C-alpha cells in the first residue's frame, strides 16, 4: 500500500496536536480518592516518620550497656519493671539493671537503645535472663528514621500508587492536590451500526469500536463513558456533541473520517472547521481528525470506523492526549529495541504499527514475533503485548534485524 497523497509525518502531527493540550486544572482530593491520579504539587512531610521511637519487634526494651557480657553460658539477669503495649502513652524510663517487656509498635521507653527478641532470653516475667547481647539500635525504630519532618514525600508529577498512599497516610497526609483523571466520552457513528449480541450481516455491522475504545480509555487511566451509536445524521451528531460537552474532557468518535459520500463525521465536523481532518503517515489508521467543540473547547478525536485501525489510532493519538490531560509524563508507551524473529514487509511512506508479541531474552534484551496486521489487525491485537513499529522509509525488515517495539501490555 502506498499513500495516494503525501501524508503528514506522524511525529510532526503529534507535536502540533499535543501542543494544544494542557493538563487538567488541579483538584484537592481526600487521600482515599487519590489513587490513579498524578500529583500536581510536591507533598511535604508534616511530621517525622516514625513520629516517635518505638519497638520494631516483640521483646525486652533494655540498655545495651547492661547486657554487653551476656552469653549462653553466662546470661545477664534484668528486672522486668513493666509491660508496654501499642496503646501505652505514659512516659517511662529504663533504669540500670532493668528492662520493659514491649510489644511490636509500642513506644520505646526512655533510656532503652535496643530490643532483645524473646528467643534470646528465658522469657521471664518478673525477671528475665538475656543470653545474647543485642547491638545498639537492634529492634528499634527512631523518630524520623524513614522521613524527616519537612522533607519531600513525593514530587509533583508522581503517579499515586497504593504504596505512595500508604506512605502519605503514615506521614499524616490526609489530602493531596492532583490532576484529575480525564472524563472521556466514546461514541461510534454510522447508520449501519448495530449493538453487540448479534453477528454482522449485509447492511449491518456490529459496533465493536465504542466498547473497545471505552475499555482502552479506562486502561489509559480515564473515566470512560460509552455513549454507543449515533446515526449519520447532522442534527443527531451535533445534538450528541452538545449533550456531552459538559461531562467530557475528551470526546472520541469513530467512523466517517474518510472522503467517501457516506463519511458524515468528516463532512459535518470538517466543513465548519470544528475538526481538522488529516492524512497522517500511519498504517493502519491514516485518516484522523482533531479539533475542539463547544465554547469550552473540549478536545475531540475522530478515528476511522475499522476496529483495528481505530485501536491503532487510539494508541498513537488518543492515548497520548489522555496522558497529557492527566499530567502524566512521558505521554507515550515505553519502547524497546527487539530482535525480529520473522521477515516482514511494510507499506511505502507510512509508519506501520503492527501487532506483535515481545519477549525478554534470558541473556537480556527482547525478541519480537510479528502477528496479523493489515486487514487482520484486530485479531492480531487480541494476542499482542506490543506494537512493532516500522518507519515511513522502511519497506521491509529481515529476520534477525533490530526493530522498535512499543510495549502495550507487560502482563504477558
Image (cartoon, helix red, strand yellow):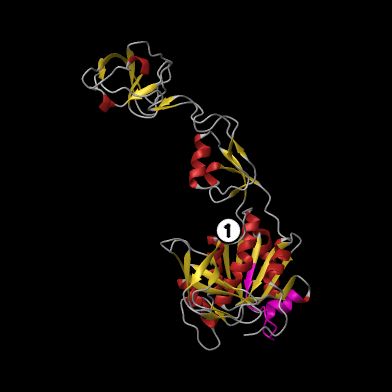
Work out whether 54 lies above or below 65: below
Q: Is residue 159 left or right of residue 7?
A: left
Furthest residue toward top: 96
Front-most of 145 and 46? 145
Q: Residues within 10 Å of mark 1 (few under 14, many from 20)?
A: many
Residue denoted by label 1: 222
Residue 230 horizontal/vertical position (percent): 62, 74
Work out whether 394 lies above or below 179: below
Quarter of the figure with residue 259? bottom right
Quarter of the figure with residue 267? bottom right
Query: Quick check: can you spot residue 376?
Result: yes
Q: Residue at x 48, y 44 (%)?
A: 163
Q: Is residue 148 magenta?
A: no
Q: Residue at x 58, y 76 (%)?
A: 309
Which region of the structure is painted magenta? 252-270
Q: Which quadrant is the N terminus positioned in?
A: bottom right
Q: Residue at x 67, y 84 (%)?
A: 262
For the residue labelled by badge 1, is the local secondary structure a helix, a strand or a loop? Answer: loop
Q: Residue at x 38, y 28 (%)?
A: 139
Q: Is residue 341 left or right of residue 63?
A: right
Residue 340 horizontal/vertical position (percent): 49, 73
Query: Quick check: can you spot residue 63?
Result: no
Quarter of the figure with residue 47? top right
Residue 256 horizontal/vertical position (percent): 65, 79
Q: Is residue 89 left or right of residue 320?
A: left
Amino acid at each position: 500500500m502506498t499513500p495516494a497523497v503525501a501524508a503528514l509525518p506522524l511525529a510532526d502531527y503529534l507535536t502540533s496536536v499535543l501542543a494544544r493540550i494542557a493538563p487538567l486544572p488541579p483538584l484537592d482530593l481526600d487521600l482515599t480518592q487519590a489513587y490513579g491520579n498524578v500529583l500536581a504539587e510536591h507533598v511535604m512531610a508534616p511530621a517525622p516518620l516514625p513520629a516517635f521511637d518505638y519497638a520494631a519487634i516483640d521483646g525486652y526494651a533494655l540498655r545495651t550497656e547492661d547486657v554487653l557480657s551476656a552469653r549462653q553460658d553466662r546470661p545477664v539477669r534484668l528486672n522486668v519493671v513493666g509491660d508496654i503495649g501499642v496503646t501505652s502513652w505514659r512516659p517511662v524510663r529504663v533504669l540500670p539493671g532493668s528492662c520493659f517487656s514491649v510489644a511490636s509498635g509500642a513506644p520505646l521507653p526512655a533510656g532503652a537503645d535496643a530490643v532483645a527478641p524473646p528467643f534470646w532470653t528465658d522469657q521471664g516475667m518478673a525477671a528475665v535472663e538475656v543470653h545474647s547481647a543485642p547491638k545498639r539500635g537492634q529492634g528499634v525504630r527512631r523518630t524520623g528514621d524513614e522521613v524527616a519532618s519537612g522533607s519531600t514525600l513525593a514530587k509533583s508529577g508522581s503517579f499515586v500508587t497504593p504504596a505512595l498512599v500508604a506512605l502519605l497516610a503514615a506521614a499524616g497526609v490526609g489530602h493531596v492536590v492532583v490532576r484529575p483523571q480525564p472524563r472521556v466520552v466514546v461514541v461510534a457513528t454510522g447508520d449501519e451500526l448495530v449493538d453487540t449480541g448479534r453477528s454482522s450481516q449485509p447492511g449491518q455491522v456490529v459496533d465493536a469500536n465504542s466498547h473497545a475504545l471505552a475499555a482502552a480509555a479506562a486502561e489509559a487511566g480515564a473515566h470512560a463513558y460509552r455513549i454507543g451509536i449515533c446515526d449519520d445524521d447532522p442534527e443527531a451528531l451535533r445534538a450528541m456533541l452538545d449533550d456531552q460537552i459538559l461531562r467530557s474532557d475528551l470526546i472520541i468518535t469513530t467512523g466517517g473520517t474518510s472522503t467517501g459520500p457516506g463519511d458524515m463525521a468528516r463532512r459535518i465536523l470538517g466543513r465548519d472547521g470544528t475538526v481538522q481532518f488529516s492524512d497522517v503517515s500511519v498504517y493502519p489508521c491514516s485518516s484522523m481528525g482533531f479539533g475542539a467543540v463547544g465554547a469550552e473547547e473540549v478536545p475531540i478525536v475522530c478515528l476511522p470506523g475499522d476496529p483495528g485501525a481505530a485501536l491503532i489510532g487510539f494508541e498513537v493519538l488518543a492515548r497520548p492526549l489522555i496522558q497529557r490531560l492527566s499530567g502524566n509524563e512521558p505521554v507515550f508507551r515505553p519502547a524497546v529495541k527487539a530482535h525480529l524473529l520473522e521477515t516482514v514487509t511494510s507499506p511505502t511512506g507510512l509508519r506501520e504499527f503492527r501487532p506483535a508479541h515481545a519477549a525478554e531474552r534470558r541473556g537480556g534484551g527482547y525478541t519480537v514475533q510479528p502477528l496479523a496486521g493489515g486487514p487482520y489487525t484486530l485479531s492480531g491485537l487480541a494476542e499482542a503485548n506490543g506494537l512493532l513499529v516500522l518507519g515511513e522509509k522502511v519497506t521491509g525488515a529481515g529476520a534477525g534485524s533490530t526493530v522498535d517495539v512499543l510495549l502495550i501490555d507487560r502482563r504477558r
